[in-house]
C-alpha cells in the first residue's frame, strides 16, 4: 500500500490505519482523499486545502495533519507541511495543545538552518509565543548547577533488614488498598468492560487528549533500592503514544500530586510554555511507542531524537525546567505496543508484555535497569541497564503509572503490579500473580529466596500480618519465571 516509504519509519502500514471519526471522514470525502496515500501525501493534500473546508472542520484538519506529520522524517517535507499550516492564518487561534504539537514538529527538523527559519516563522504566526533560544538558555543553566548527593549511612545499608513485597491485581471493581486513581484512569472489572475478576487498570481509553494515572500512595525507602514489576497491554487499532512509570518524592501524596502534560510528554514532562511537568518527580521511565519522548524539545533537554518502540529515562524537574534525558534504548527489535489489535491482546500469546524495573543504589545515587518479556513464553531480557539518576535522592519515594494521548490515541492498561522494597535485585525475585487477592509478603533478606508468589496452596502458607520465612524453591522448580502463566 505504501510504495514509497523512504521518508518514514519502516513500520507496518496496518499499524497506522485510522479508525475514521465523523469529522475525519468528512474531510476525506470533501477533499476526495484516496485511501492508499502515504502519511506525507495525505498531510500535503489536507494542509494545502484547509481553507477550502468548512470553518468547523478546520481545527480538526490541522490536528489530523499534525498526526501524519509526526511520521515524516525528511526535513524539507516536514517544513512544507508546517508552512502550509502557517498559511492558514489560524495560528493564534489554535488551542494551546495543538500549538505545542506543531512546535514539537519543528524540533524534528534535522537541518539546522531550516529549523531556525521554521522557528522564526512559527513565532511570527503566533504558534510559538516564547523565543526558543531564550528558553533553551534557561534550561542549560539549570542543568549545569551542581547536584547534591544524598547523605546515607553505610551502617544502615549494611544492616540486615526485611524485604517487603506487595502484589496487586486490578482485576476487580474495587481499587486496591493504598492506590489512588486520577484523571481518566479507571478499573475495567466492573461487569461492563470486563467481568469482575478479569479486569485491568485502564489509564487511557481510545480517545484523544486523555490522561490517566495511578499512584501507589505509600512511602518506599530508597536506601536499599526497590523493584517494580507489572504486565501491560495496548489496543485500539491505532498507534498510541505510550506510558511512563515514575517515582516521586515520598512526601507527595495523592491530593497534591501534579501530573505532567498530555501528548508526547506522556504525563511526565512539560510541553510548551503553559503545560508544566510532573512536580517533585525523581525520575520517569517511558515506554515510548511512537518515539517522541526521547526527542529533544524546548522543555525536554537532551535525547537522540525520535526513537519509536524505545524505553527512555528522564530526570525530574520543576515546572518547565529540568526533565533531562538520562539514557534509553535504541529501537527495540519487538514492538512495545500492539497497534494492530482492536481489543486487548491475548495474554498467552507473543503479544503479552511484562516488565521488571530495578532501582539499585550506586555511589549514593540510584541506577535503573529494565528487563522485559516480549511474549508469554519468551525469556526475560535486559533492554536497559545502568542509567544513573542524578541529584539528591529522597529517603522515600512513591511509585506511579501515567499514560496520555494527544492526536494519537489508544487504550493503555496495567495489571499484576508487584512493588518490592529490597536489597539489589540479585537478592530477590518476585513473581506476579494475576488471579489472587492483594497480599503483603515479608521475607528475611538472608533467605535470598528465589521465588515469592502469593499463590494460596498447601505448600506455601503466607501470612499477611507477620514475617514468614520462605524455603528456596527446588533446583528443578519451574516457578522462577517472574510472570504468571495466566496473564489475562
Image (cartoon, rainbow, N blue to C red):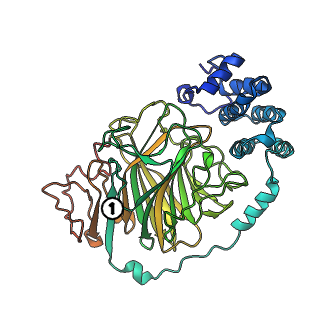
**Local secondary structure at mark 1:** strand
Q: Which residue is mark 1?
A: 166
Q: Is residue 57 above or below residue 463?
A: above
Q: Is residue 115 above or below residue 445?
A: above
Residue drawn 16% across and 61% down? 461
Count all numbered tags in the image, as a single digit.
1
User: Does residue 187 appear anywhere in the picture?
Assistant: yes
Residue drawn 20% across and 62% down? 462
Looking at this view, is 118 or 447 the one in front? 118
Looking at the image, the residue that sits furthest to the left is 458
Q: Give the left or right position of residue 361, taking residue 429 as reference.
A: right
Q: Position of residue 20 (x, y in %)?
A: 58, 25
Looking at this view, is 469 or 29 the one in front? 29
User: Does residue 293 appear anywhere in the picture?
Assistant: no
Residue drawn 65% across and 34% down? 67
Q: Give the left or right position of residue 357, taking residue 34 as reference.
A: left
Q: Give the left or right position of residue 335, taking residue 478 as reference.
A: right
Q: Position of residue 291 (x, y in %)?
A: 60, 43
The N terminus lies in quadrant: top right
Q: Callout 1: 10 Å neighbours few (<14), some, many (20+)?
A: some
Residue drawn 48% across and 30% down? 340
Amino acid at each position: 500500500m505504501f510504495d514509497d516509504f523512504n521518508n518514514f519509519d519502516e513500520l507496518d502500514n496496518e499499524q497506522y490505519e485510522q479508525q475514521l471519526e465523523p469529522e475525519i471522514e468528512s474531510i476525506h470525502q470533501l477533499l476526495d482523499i484516496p485511501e492508499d496515500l502515504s502519511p506525507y501525501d495525505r498531510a500535503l493534500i489536507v494542509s494545502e486545502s484547509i481553507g477550502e473546508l468548512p470553518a468547523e472542520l478546520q481545527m480538526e484538519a490541522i490536528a489530523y495533519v499534525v498526526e501524519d506529520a509526526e511520521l515524516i522524517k525528511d526535513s524539507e517535507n516536514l517544513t512544507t507541511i508546517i508552512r502550509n499550516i502557517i498559511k492558514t492564518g489560524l495560528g493564534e487561534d489554535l488551542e494551546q495543545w495543538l500549538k505545542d504539537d506543531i512546535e514539537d514538529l519543528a524540533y524534528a527538523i534535522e537541518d539546522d538552518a531550516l529549523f531556525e527559519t521554521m522557528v522564526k516563522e512559527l513565532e511570527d504566526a503566533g504558534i510559538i509565543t516564547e523565543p526558543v533560544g531564550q528558553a533553551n538558555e534557561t534550561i542549560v543553566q539549570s542543568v549545569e548547577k551542581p547536584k547534591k548527593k544524598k547523605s546515607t549511612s553505610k551502617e544502615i545499608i549494611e544492616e540486615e533488614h526485611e524485604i517487603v513485597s506487595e502484589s496487586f491485581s486490578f482485576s476487580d471493581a474495587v481499587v486496591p488498598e493504598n492506590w489512588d486513581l486520577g484523571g481518566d484512569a479507571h478499573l475495567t472489572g466492573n461487569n461492563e468492560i470486563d467481568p469482575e475478576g478479569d479486569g485491568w487498570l485502564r489509564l487511557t481509553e481510545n480517545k484523544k487528549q486523555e490522561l490517566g494515572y495511578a499512584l501507589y500512595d505509600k512511602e518506599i525507602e530508597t536506601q536499599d533500592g526497590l523493584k517494580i514489576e507489572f504486565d501491560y497491554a495496548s489496543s485500539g487499532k491505532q498507534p498510541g503514544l505510550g506510558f511512563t512509570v515514575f517515582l516521586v518524592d515520598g512526601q507527595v501524596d495523592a491530593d497534591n500530586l501534579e501530573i505532567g502534560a498530555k501528548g508526547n510528554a506522556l504525563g511526565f514532562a512539560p510541553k510548551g510554555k503553559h503545560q508544566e511537568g510532573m512536580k517533585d518527580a525523581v525520575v520517569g521511565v517511558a515506554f515510548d511507542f511512537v518515539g517522541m519522548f526521547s526527542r529533544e524539545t524546548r522543555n525536554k533537554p537532551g535525547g537522540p531524537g525520535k526513537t519509536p518502540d524505545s524505553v527512555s529515562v528522564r530526570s525530574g524537574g520543576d515546572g518547565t525546567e529540568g526533565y533531562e534525558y538520562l539514557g534509553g534504548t535504541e529501537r527495540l527489535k519487538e514492538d512495545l505496543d500492539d497497534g494492530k489489535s482492536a481489543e486487548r491482546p491475548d495474554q498467552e500469546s507473543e503479544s503479552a508484555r511484562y516488565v521488571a524495573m530495578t532501582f539499585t543504589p550506586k555511589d549514593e545515587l540510584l541506577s535503573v535497569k529494565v528487563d522485559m518479556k516480549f511474549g508469554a513464553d519468551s525469556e526475560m531480557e535486559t533492554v536497559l541497564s545502568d542509567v544513573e539518576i542524578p541529584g539528591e535522592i529522597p529517603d522515600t519515594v512513591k511509585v506511579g503509572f501515567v499514560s496520555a494521548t494527544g492526536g494519537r490515541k489508544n487504550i493503555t492498561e496495567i495489571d499484576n503490579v508487584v512493588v518490592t522494597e529490597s536489597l539489589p535485585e540479585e537478592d530477590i525475585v518476585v513473581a506476579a500473580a494475576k488471579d489472587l487477592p492483594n497480599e503483603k509478603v515479608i521475607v528475611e533478606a538472608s533467605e535470598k529466596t528465589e521465588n515469592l508468589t502469593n499463590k494460596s496452596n498447601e505448600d506455601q502458607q503466607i501470612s499477611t500480618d507477620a514475617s514468614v520465612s520462605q524455603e528456596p524453591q527446588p533446583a528443578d522448580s519451574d516457578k522462577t519465571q517472574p510472570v504468571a502463566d495466566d496473564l489475562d
